[in-house]
Image (tube, grey):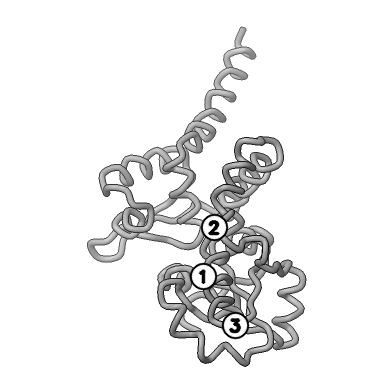
């Protein structure tokens, strides 16, 4: 029947989006693009993949209308098609973490480095209050290009690999909070442990930039 054909076509088209998310490498690219737009070269460096592999995965995402491009000279920049794509990815992660014991266990193993139980947490609501009161030094420990693409207003860029240079200026700071890409990102955990080992008391945001953005909270771009 015609109605059956129409229903089948509908679900076929829905499956295109589902299939686009059905690759661990594409999910990693979506997470990186949730931080801000990137070139193929930048994505390949960040994900540790070959450029041809990244290009192939981006084409799948583009055909599913999940990413868009813009050209600047000879460079092509990729970005998520909209905040709703980031929200879909965040929702998928949340459901997977809640419903899949395997995902939850894998995340615990990934984040369970020495001293992880000692890393204090700050909720988004608490961080908003601290920022409004000017009572926090907020460190964005992602790579600098991600900071420039979009960061929490009031944060300063302190990439994890250069964090040691920040220690002397942070020892007397009353409240230090670090954040990175999101709740599946280990960089903020590492930052808090590095700072703690150097005598700086610090905590991390409970999640990160992905969740901040999808919650509709303000985002700044460029240098502070």
Label 3: state its secondary structure.
Answer: loop
Task: Classify residue 172 by image quadrant.
Answer: bottom right
Q: Earlier in the sequence, mark 2 or mark 1?
A: 1
Q: Are marks 3 and 2 in contact (CB under 8 Å)?
A: no
- Secondary structure at numbered mark 1: loop
SS under mark 2: loop
Question: Which image quadrant: the N terminus?
Answer: top right
Residue in the picture at 44% in, 43% down: 26
Residue 218 sits in quarter: bottom right
In terms of depth relative to the viewer, which is nearer, 149 or 67?
149
* Mark number, residue 150: 1
Disc 2 marks which residue? Answer: 185
Drawn side of residue 223 relative to residue 132, left or right: left
**Above or below 81: residue 196:** below
Distance, label 1 to label 3, CA atoms, is: 26 Å
Q: Residue 109: percent from the left, percent from the top?
A: 57, 47
Which of label 2 and label 1 is nearer to you?
A: 2
Say which residue appears at 33% left-offset and 46% top-offset. 54
Residue 199 versus residue 202: which sits nearer the camera?
A: 199
Judging depth in this view, the residue of 149 and 74 nearest the camera is 149
Among the two numbered marks 3 and 2 on one chain, the one whose residue lies closer to the N terminus: 2
From the image, state whether disc 3 or disc 2 is nearer to you. 3
Q: Residues within 10 Å of mark 1 (few under 14, many from 20)?
A: many
Residue 92 falls left or right of residue 40: right
**Residue at x 48% of width, y 49% of height:** 30
Q: Residues within 10 Å of mark 3 (few under 14, many from 20)?
A: many
Query: Residue 77 has which mark?
Result: none
The residue pinned by badge 3 equals 200
Left or right of 28 in this view: 216: right
- Alpha carbon separation for disc pair 2 and 1: 16 Å
114 in relation to 135, above or below: above
């Amino acid at each position: 029947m015609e109605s059956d054909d129409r229903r089948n076509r509908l679900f076929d088209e829905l499956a295109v989006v589902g299939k686009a998310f059905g690759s661990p490498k594409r999910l990693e690219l979506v997470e990186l693009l949730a931080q801000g737009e990137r070139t193929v070269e930048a994505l390949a460096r960040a994900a540790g993949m070959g450029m041809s592999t990244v290009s192939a995965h981006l084409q799948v995402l583009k055909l599913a209308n999940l990413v868009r491009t813009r050209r600047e000279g000879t460079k092509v920049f990729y970005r998520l098609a909209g905040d709703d794509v980031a929200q879909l990815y965040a929702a998928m992660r949340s459901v997977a973490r809640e419903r899949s014991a395997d995902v939850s266990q894998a995340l615990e193993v990934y984040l369970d480095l020495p001293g992880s139980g000692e890393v204090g947490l700050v909720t988004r609501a608490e961080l908003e209050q601290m920022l409004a009161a000017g009572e926090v030094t907020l460190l964005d420990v992602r790579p600098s290009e991600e900071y420039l693409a979009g960061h929490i207003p009031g944060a300063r860029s302190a990439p994890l690999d250069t964090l040691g240079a920040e220690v002397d200026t942070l020892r007397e700071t009353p409240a230090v909070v670090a954040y990175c890409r999101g709740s599946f990102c280990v960089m903020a955990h590492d930052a808090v442990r590095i700072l703690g080992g150097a005598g700086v008391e610090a905590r991390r945001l409970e999640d990160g930039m992905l969740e901040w953005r999808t919650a509709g909270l303000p985002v700044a771009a460029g240098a502070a």
